[in-house]
């Protein structure tokens, strides 16, 4: 099934519409996104392959998705650790952080040590709204993700990639190719350059909204929140 891609501009417009006429709250959208991410982790890194999962979170919505995913992973029986160096003062993010602390999920400021002692990494640093320069402390983090042999699942976009034009030609993200990618709601144009395992998640759109934004809803099965879609089938 060939899936059309969703530009960064249309992805932002879709989020805005979902939170206005669509009657969704940002809490709901983040919970659904994080749930999809957690299921993608379960698919690529089942607990019997290693329960230690390092979730690297950025300061925005992508990081919030990571916080939600970490909570679900804990309840699945994983041992998540969260790297969240630029914690938002926004109430939503503070609540998500507190929920993890109440579960005794550890937070770390030492990314090199954390990545050296984990079985899998979730890259929830930058999403579809990223543009411009990668700022501290994330350049070294992205370099570590690129150079590590630990498998990485990227959330919506490999961090530092341009949503429209894919991997950067220079900087810390040059050569960064995660093992897996979960596209939230719909693949973004950058998927044309991605070579790993690819999932689509976000099982909540109405047919009317999907048609308006040119989104092909993949064939979700049973209670699954994700569908694996080979990248060659999501490059329209």
Image (tube, rainbow, N blue to C red):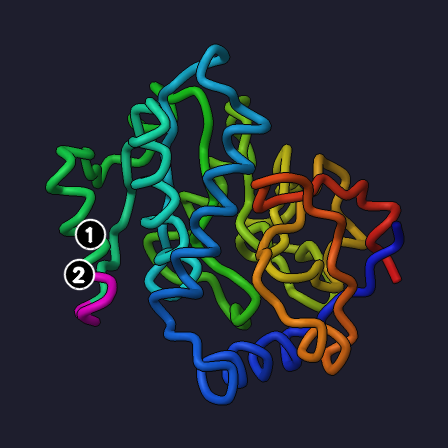
Can the viewer see residue 176? yes
Question: What percent of the width, then of the height, locates residue 76?
Answer: 36, 28
* Cα distance between the residues tagged 2 and 1: 5 Å
Residue sitting at x 32%, y 49%: 67
User: Does 30 sit above or below residue 230?
Assistant: below
Residue at left offset 51%, top offset 29%: 42
Q: Is residue 82 magenta?
A: no
Q: Quadrant of the C terminus?
A: bottom right
Q: Where is residue 127? Give x, y as percent.
A: 52, 61
Answer yes or no: do the residues labelled 2 and 1 have beta carbons within 8 Å? Answer: yes
> From this viewpoint, is residue 172 visible?
no
State the predominant SS element of the stretch in magenta: helix
Q: Is residue 84 above or below residue 166?
A: above
Label 2 crowd bin: few (<14), some (14–19), many (20+), radius 10 Å: few
Is 91 contained in the magenta span?
A: yes
Of residues 173 and 68, the one drawn nearer to the viewer in this rendering: 68
Label 1 element class = helix
Left or right of residue 67: residue 99: left
Q: Position of residue 201 (x, y in %)?
A: 60, 51
Q: Quadrant of residue 110?
A: top left
Identify which residue, 117 or 185, lies in the foreground.
185
**Depth order, front residue of 132/71:** 71
Q: Secondary structure at mark 2?
A: helix
Residue found at the very far front of the displayed protein: 222
Q: Position of residue 97 (x, y in %)?
A: 20, 52
Which residue in the rendered view is the most extreme toward the bottom?
21
Which residue occupies the extreme top position in the image?
Answer: 48
Residue under pointer 2: 94
Number of residues whose C-alpha sits closer than 10 Å to that of mark 1, classed few (under 14), some (14–19) or many (20 or more): many
Q: Which mark is residue 97?
A: 1
For the magenta stretch, what is the residue range? Answer: 89-94
């Amino acid at each position: 099934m060939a899936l059309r891609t969703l530009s960064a501009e249309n992805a932002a417009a879709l989020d805005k519409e979902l939170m206005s006429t669509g009657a969704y709250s940002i809490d709901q959208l983040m919970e659904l996104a994080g749930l999809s991410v957690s299921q993608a982790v379960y698919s690529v890194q089942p607990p019997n392959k290693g329960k230690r999962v390092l979730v690297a979170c950025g300061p925005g919505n992508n990081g919030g998705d990571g916080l939600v995913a970490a909570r679900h992973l804990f309840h699945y029986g994983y041992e998540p650790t969260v790297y969240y160096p630029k914690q938002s003062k926004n109430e939503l993010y503070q609540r998500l952080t507190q929920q993890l602390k109440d579960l005794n999920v550890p937070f770390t400021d030492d990314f090199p040590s954390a990545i050296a002692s984990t079985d899998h990494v979730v890259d929830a640093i930058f999403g579809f709204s990223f543009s411009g320069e990668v700022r501290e402390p994330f350049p070294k983090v992205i370099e570590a993700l690129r150079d590590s042999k630990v498998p990485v699942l990227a959330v919506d976009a490999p961090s530092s990639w341009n949503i429209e034009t894919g991997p950067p030609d220079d900087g810390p993200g040059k050569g960064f190719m995660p093992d897996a990618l979960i596209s939230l709601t719909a693949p973004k144009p950058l998927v044309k350059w991605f070579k790993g395992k690819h999932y689509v998640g976000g099982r909540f759109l109405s047919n009317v909204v999907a048609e308006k934004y040119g989104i092909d809803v993949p064939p979700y099965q049973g209670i699954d929140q994700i569908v694996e879609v080979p990248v060659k089938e999501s490059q329209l």
